[in-house]
Image (cartoon, rainbow, N blue to C red):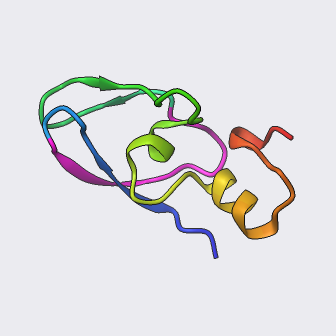
Amino acid sequence: MIELKSEITCPTCGYKKLERMPTDACWFFYDCNGCGVKLRPNAGDCCVFCSFGTIPCPPIQETRADRKGATCCGGR
């Protein structure tokens, strides 16, 4: 089952917020509500959920579940 909520933790200030992940788009940027820093994915990650969230984005979760090699945002 695909999880649609992930808690993003800001690496700068430690602020945490539970966010609902979209199933049809990636979040490449995220503004921290704690300190205002704009988060971007770490090198090698597809989105801010994969870099700073407790649960990776839905396309990556699907990749792990079905092992078909899906990538973020539905690319193959």
Any magenta on residue 23? Answer: yes
Tell me where residue 32 appears, x and y as whole percent: 23, 34
* Rendered-image quadrant of the C terminus: top right
Please give left or right for residue 23 compared with residue 9 in the image.
right
Please give left or right for residue 20 compared with residue 57 in the image.
left
Reply above or below: 25 against 66: above
Tell me where residue 53 appears, x and y as whole percent: 40, 51
At 50% across and 52% down in the image, what residue appears? 21
* Rendered-image quadrant of the N terminus: bottom right
At 70% across and 39% down in the image, what residue appears? 73
Front position in the image: 68 or 74: 68
Reply above or below: 62 against 25: below
Tell me where residue 6 appears, x and y as whole percent: 41, 58
Range of magenta residues:
14-27
Q: Quadrant of residue 24?
A: top right
Q: Residue furthest bottom?
A: 1
- How many labels were placed on the picture? 0
Please give left or right for residue 55 compared with residue 11 in the image.
right
Q: Quadrant of residue 35?
A: top left
Please give left or right for residue 44 compared with residue 65 in the image.
left
Front position in the image: 24 or 57: 57
